[in-house]
Every structure is written in structure tokens, then in C-alpha cells.
Amino acid sequence: MVRGTLTGMKPGTILGHEGVGIVEEVGRDVRNLRPGDRVVIPSTIACGSCSYCRAGYFSQCDRANPNGAEAGTAFFGGPASSGPFDGLQAEKARVPFANVGLLKLPDAVTDEQAILLSDIFPTGYFGADLAEITAGDTVTVFGCGPVGLFAIASARLLGAGRVLAVDRVKSRLEMARSLGAEVVDFEEEDPVAALKRLTGGVGVDRVIDAVGVDAETAHHGPAAKAARKEKGRFDKEREEVAPEADPKGETWKPGEAPSQVLDWAVGALAKAGTLAIIGVYPESARSFPIGKAMNKNLTLQMGNCHHRKYLPHLIELVVEGVVDPTDVLTQVQPLVSAIEAYETFDRREDGWTKVMLEPAAVRA
């Protein structure tokens, strides 16, 4: 949203779609919460009553988005097409449909654990669910940012026999390794060739794209030669998806190869495999290797996470000690330092994987 690859942001919109807080006031129809309750706020907004919500498709709620039922997912801190709703990187927030959109937290779940339940853990789990992972499957996760790391953990929870992780940031690859993943650095080896070799030439059963439109391509190693050949196509794609981009030097630069991960994913999959796309792509992104995917009889599943569907189960996993989400939390910064934190994260600096922002009152 800051880089410009998700267009339509209104100046002055408060950002942030993850939040944990204390209820101060409830509306007339919020009958399951009271002031003083500590709650986690799902990133996407849903009414809980329409046919889509009742079927578990909370991100496709017919009522939450004021732009209409066909406008797409409503979420906090997004562009005009998503509402817009002011975000949660603030000291106070108003939560629509709070009887559905707030979940009371058990005392055993800390604020640090809960903030990671607001979006990235459910989204990673959603990706593993979409990928149709069954016991013994070999799974590849592209992108070892916070969502990708939770996709790795979720793939293991769903019974994956092997998980391979692709990225180029050393600290992220090390975190993926600590979660039991076999890691591939795409700056050192061609990821498709490496994944094929590591699977006896067959390819992987499932792929989760946890990168999206801000994908980068290789600048070194065997994959760089192919990337140079595709530079003209990637440049054209970037112009189409980020017409409002306004980089400040090396900051806020859109990803240089919007469809790179999709190319790699389809190439790495075995025949009849499944590709789950949870990385964000705007409507202006139109490049996909459809011919190769069709000829391999691939299954494609994608979308925005139905956070409210998964949260009760994931909260229980945290309470039971099966998962500690804070394993991916690398920084805690004051809310007033949000801009500096955004800039450092944007540069993909080593060691900056997930950042929590705290209001001054909490830090005191």
C-alpha cells in the first residue's frame, strides 16, 4: 500500500490491519463482549450473517464493504476499494460488526502472541489449507517473510512430510530452517532446478505463494540469466500494477518482477499439484503462465484470508502450547516510530522479519 502496488490509497488513511486491544465501549447489538475485555481484531471485516459469512467465506462478506457486495474484501487500513476503513496502528479504533470481528482472548495468550493471530498466522494457515496439504506431501513455500514462516509452520501442522522454503534474505532463511524447512536461496541457485533436483526430478506436490506482486528476481547465480531475459516483461508488468508508485531513492520501490514467483511456482510443481496464492495481487496484475499450468493439470486456489474462520482454532493451539507465534517476532517499536520501522522493513534489512508497534501507554 505504501509502495503503490496496491493502488487507490486515500491520503490521511490510518494504516495497519492487525490489532489487540481492550474494549472501552460496545454498540447496541454487541451482546457477547463488555468493556474491559481484552480482544484480538481479525484483519478482515465481516458481518457474520450473510450467506458467505455463514459458509465460512468471511473475506467475501456481502455487507461489510460499503462499496457493495461485488467490491471485494473489506479490511482495516486499505485503499478506497476496501472501504476504506481507518487502520489499527492507532491508540483507539472503531470495529464494525464487533460481535463477530472481536474475539476475547484467554489470559494464557499474551499480547505479543495475539497480535500475530490478528493476520499473519491465520493467513499462513489459510495458505496451507488452500494448498490441500495431506499427510506426507512435499510442500514449497515461496517467501519467508512472516506470512511465509507461518505457512511453513501450518504446513507441518497439516501433516506435510517435507517443506522447502525459497527466499534470498539470510535471516529469513535461517528462521525457515529453524521451523524445519529445507531452504533454497534463489540468489545462489535456480529455485525451480533446485526443487526438481531435491525431489528426484518430480517436483513438489503443493506450492504456497506467500510473496505476491512485490516479488523480486535473482541478481546473481543461475537464475539471474533467465531474469535478465525477462526484464522487459517484468518492467511492463511493474508499470501496469504500480502506476502511482513514487519511490524515494531505495525506499518504497515496488517489486521488480511481479509475476516471478508465479512462474517459479508453476515450474516447480509436479503434475496434478496444487498452487495456493495468498500473496497480494491487485486487479491490475494480469500475468500468469496459464498454458503451462493447464498442461500440468494444476489446481489453483487463491484469495484473501477468512481470518474469523480460523482464529478460534489457532487461539486454542497457542493456549495448548502447540505453536508460539512470537517465534517470528523480531522487533518491538513504539507507535510513534512507525515511519522509521516501515522504512527499515521496506529495505528488507537482515533481521527485520516482523515488527510490533506499541502505543506509549502500553510501553510505559
Image (spheres, rainbow, N blue to C red):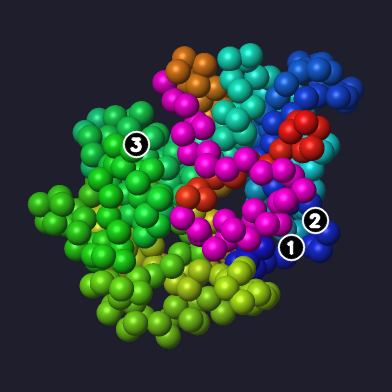
| Residue in the image at 33% along x and 38% along y | 178
Let me know if residue 334 is in the magenta part: yes
Left or right: 183, with 75 as reference point: left
Residue 15 vs residue 278, the one in the foreground: 15
Residue 315 screen position, x and y as percent: 54, 22
Badge 1: few (under 14), some or many (20 or more) residues near its Cα, within 10 Å?
some
For badge 1, the amino acid type reads: Met
Residue designated by label 3: 179
Q: Mark 1 sits on what residue?
A: 9
Q: Image point 38% across, 35% down: which residue?
A: 153
The earlier-in-sequence mark between 1 and 3 is: 1
Point out the stretch of residues depicted in magenta.
322-350
Of discs 1 and 3, which sits in the foreground? 3
Gap between marks 2 and 3 measured at Cα: 36 Å
- Image x and y of residue 63, in percent: 74, 41
Q: Quadrant of residue 244?
A: bottom right
Amino acid carrying label 2: it is Thr
